[in-house]
Image (spheres, helix red, strand yellow):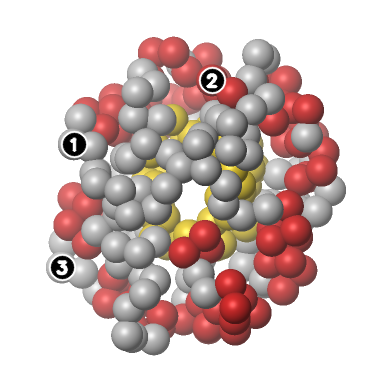
């Protein structure tokens, strides 16, 4: 079964970031998930523009940039000019007055446009944007911190999105509290990829390659 695995780099060892990127790529990671927080849209700070630029300069695999910031259109060019064609950029629709304008800037730069949907955001409120984006990042926890508990009602939202994805031409990705049982349940249903953090990937006494191989060998 084919599905993507993305490393949540806010959980990485920043004292050995170059080694982390190398080990993850050698282990078979599909992309690097970069969480940018401004302390306003979410009550926390995570990775910075410089962190993103550093990883973009080292990594061969694509970047998957999640902008948890207010009014991303005001700053979008700062991020786009430091990324590469084919990288993904997600915005939160609630964070922008006219999110379609920001998404068009992402498209014009040769990036893959995406939206991130919070647990409290309904599918109905983002319906028109589903026709613009190529990726939908479903937050199974409230954004802003790693290590939170899964909110079970998010599963019904994924079911709604799965019914729409073929007609509207987008893929669904899971972010937050991603455990093996969630991959085993939702990958067969059509979720295209999973962001891995402290639940499965980081902070384990095990090489990344072994962990990633074990995930791909789960019995579905």
Q: Is residue 69 left or right of residue 137?
A: right
Q: Position of residue 79 (x, y in %)?
A: 76, 45
Q: Is residue 11 left or right of residue 59?
A: left
The earlier-in-sequence mark between 2 and 1 is: 2
Q: Which residue is at 32% across, 85% downward?
A: 205
| Disc 2 residue crowd, few under 14, some 14–19, many 20+, Cα 10 Å | some
Q: Element under label 3?
A: loop
Q: Is residue 1 left or right of residue 118?
A: left
Q: Position of residue 56 (x, y in %)?
A: 72, 64
Q: Element under label 2?
A: helix
Q: Which residue is at 35% across, 48% downward?
A: 176
Q: Position of residue 129 (x, y in %)?
A: 55, 20
Alpha carbon of mark 2 to alpha carbon of mark 3: how far? 38 Å
Question: Can you tell which of label 3 and label 1 is closer to the viewer?
Answer: 1
Alpha carbon of mark 3 to alpha carbon of mark 1: how far? 22 Å
- Mark number, residue 94: 2
The earlier-in-sequence mark between 2 and 3 is: 2
Observer-nearest of 78 and 127: 78
| Disc 3 residue crowd, few under 14, some 14–19, many 20+, Cα 10 Å | few
Which quadrant does the C terminus fall into?
A: bottom left
Residue 67 seen in the current view: no
The earlier-in-sequence mark between 3 and 1 is: 1
Q: Which residue is mark 1?
A: 152
Alpha carbon of mark 2 to alpha carbon of mark 1: how far? 22 Å
Mark 3 and mark 2 in contact (Cβ < 8 Å)?
no
Instruction: Answer above or below: position of 118 versus 123.
Output: below
Q: Which residue is at 72% across, 20% downward?
A: 101
Q: Which residue is mark 3?
A: 219
- Mark number, residue 57: none
The answer to which quarter of the image holds residue 183 is bottom left
Q: Position of residue 71 (x, y in %)?
A: 68, 25
Which quadrant does the N terminus fall into?
A: bottom left
């Amino acid at each position: 079964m084919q599905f993507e695995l993305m490393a949540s780099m806010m959980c990485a060892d920043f004292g050995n970031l170059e080694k982390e990127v190398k080990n993850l790529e050698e282990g078979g990671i599909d992309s690097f998930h970069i969480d940018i927080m401004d302390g306003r849209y979410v009550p926390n700070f995570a990775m910075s523009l410089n962190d993103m630029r550093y990883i973009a300069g080292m990594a061969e695999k694509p970047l998957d940039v999640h902008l948890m910031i207010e009014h991303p259109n005001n700053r979008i060019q700062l991020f786009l000019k430091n990324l590469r064609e084919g990288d993904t950029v997600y915005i939160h629709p609630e964070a922008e007055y006219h999110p379609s304008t920001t998404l068009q800037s992402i498209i014009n730069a040769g990036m893959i446009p995406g939206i991130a949907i919070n647990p409290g955001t309904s599918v109905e409120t983002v319906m028109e944007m589903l026709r613009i984006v190529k990726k939908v990042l479903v937050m199974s926890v409230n954004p802003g911190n790693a290590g939170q508990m899964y909110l079970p009602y998010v599963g019904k939202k994924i079911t709604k999105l799965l019914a729409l994805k073929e007609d509207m031409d987008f893929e669904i990705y899971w972010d937050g509290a991603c455990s093996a049982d969630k991959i085993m349940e939702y990958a067969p249903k059509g979720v295209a990829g999973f962001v891995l953090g402290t639940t499965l990937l980081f902070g384990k006494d095990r090489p990344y390659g072994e962990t990633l191989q074990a995930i791909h060998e789960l019995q579905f």
